[in-house]
Amino acid sequence: MRQQATAEFAKMGLPQGEIDGLLDKMGDAVVAVAADAMRQDFARAFTEVYTKDELRGMADFYDTAAGKAWAEKQPEVQQKLMQAMDAARSCRNAGRAENRRRLPPPRTAPQFRSRPATRGETLCALWRLL
């Protein structure tokens, strides 16, 4: 997988030393998000979205104390975000159920008549049901 990611970064013209450093620095963050099998997909996505300078900036960031803290704490942040999204989804679904209970009862079809309804009467009756 590393060879494939290296090839993707090499296509951008990054020197081998920078590619190795970038993959090493980003490796921990990538592994935290996905398995090694996904590395090629991550490399492709990064090279399609970011410029060489942006990738270098990210690699530099991971060398800083803030970058190391970000990479270390990202799984905890993701877990908290998932909990928040689950709670929001539960509230939204509860709100939908409450709104359905507040709706008026569905309209009923008009009673049968002794004579067949005209085309206009039928269309009007159908329109009212909507």
Image (tube, grey):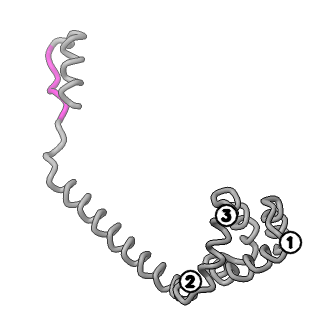
Q: Left or right? Give the position of 34 relative to 72.
A: right
Quarter that holds the N terminus: bottom right
Residue linked to disc 1: 3
Q: Is residue 28 above or below residue 116?
A: below
Residue 86 lies in magenta, yes or no?
no
Instruction: Give x and y (percent) for residue 36.
Output: 74, 77
- Local packing at callout 2 (Cα closer than 10 Å; few below 14, some 14-19, many 20+) is some
Residue at position x 13%, y 46% in the image: 104
> Residues under labels 1 and 3: Cα distance?
16 Å
Amino acid at pointer 2: Gly
Determine whether the residue tagged by mark 1 lies in a helix, strand or loop: helix
Amino acid at pointer 1: Gln
Q: Is residue 29 above or below residue 121?
A: below
Q: Left or right? Give the position of 31 relative to 13.
A: left
Determine whether the residue tagged by mark 2 lies in a helix, strand or loop: helix
Circle count = 3
Residue linked to disc 2: 67
> Residues under labels 2 and 1: Cα distance?
25 Å
Q: Quadrant of residue 113?
A: top left
- Asked whether the beta carbons under mark 2 and mark 3 sit within 8 Å of each other, the answer is no
Q: Is residue 90 above or below residue 110?
A: below
Residue at position x 42%, y 76% in the image: 81
Foreground label between 2 and 1: 2
Q: Is residue 32 above or below residue 46?
A: below
Residue 111 lies in magenta, yes or no?
yes
Instruction: Give x and y (percent) for residue 7.
Output: 84, 65
Instruction: Give x and y (percent) for residue 90.
Output: 32, 69
- Local packing at callout 1 (Cα closer than 10 Å; few below 14, some 14-19, many 20+) is few
Question: Which range is magenta?
Answer: 108-114
